[in-house]
Amino acid sequence: MNSNGNIFLVGPMGAGKTTIGRMLARTLGVPFVDSDREIEQRTGVSIPMIFEYEGEAGFRKRESEVIGLLTEDSPLVLATGGGAVLAPENQQVLMERGFVVYLQCSVERQLERTRNDAHRPLLKTPNPRAKLEELCLVRDPIYRAVADYIVDTGTFSSRNAARQIARAYRRLFHNAPA
């Protein structure tokens, strides 16, 4: 955990990383960046298109490069992609360069929040629930291992989750941005 002013949000798709990240950044008065949007801006194509042409491995490589660059800046709130923690180099970078918050969310809530979102290549499957459960089994232990703090976003509203994270961050780092 690093007190350089960075807060990195990790967690599954549909957990609210982008929504909560924007609110949190506004509360703390720091910039907000979404790693997926940053990848799209840098490549000029959508995440689903990157998956289609380069596969998940190609996307993950781009994701690691972007996370490496973005985490050099501070202070900022960064929303990472759900699978960003799969790469050991990303785990290390996130833990060394900021305060990592795991936005935990049940599979049921994820299904509710992502059911009409065509922007989720991993859910292009006949059984999205089974895919989300499979991802949770693999990723949940990693999210927990890298996290300095955990918030259940199925329990709190986005606004309350952002407030809770800001309070925890300020308690840990007394001189944190107001």
Image (tube, rainbow, N blue to C red):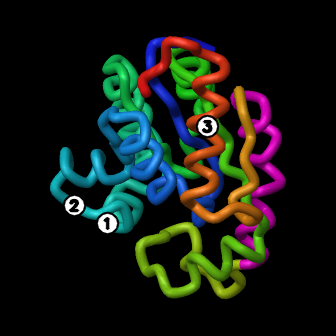
Q: In the image, what residue occupies the spot 58% across and 24% down?
A: 170
The quarter of the rendered structure image containing the N terminus is top right
Direction from residue 73 to residue 82 in the image, left or right: right
Span highlighted in magenta in the image: 129-147
The quarter of the rendered structure image containing the C terminus is top left
Residue picked out by circle 1:
49
Looking at the rendered structure, the secondary structure element under dot 3 is helix
Label 1 is placed on what type of residue?
Met
Q: Position of residue 167 (x, y in %)?
A: 62, 34
Label 2 is placed on what type of residue?
Val
Label 3 is placed on what type of residue?
Val
Work out whether residue 86 can be spotted.
no
Image disc number at residue 85: 3
Q: Is residue 131 above or below residue 124?
A: above
Image disc number at residue 45: 2
Q: In the image, what residue occupies the spot 34% across and 42% down?
A: 33
Q: Position of residue 55 (x, y in %)?
A: 44, 56
Q: Verify CB contact (< 8 Å) between mark 2 and mark 1.
A: yes
> In which quadrant of the rendered view does residue 50 lie?
bottom left
Return the disc, 1 or 3, that comes first in the chain's sequence.
1
Closer to the camera, 104 or 127?
104
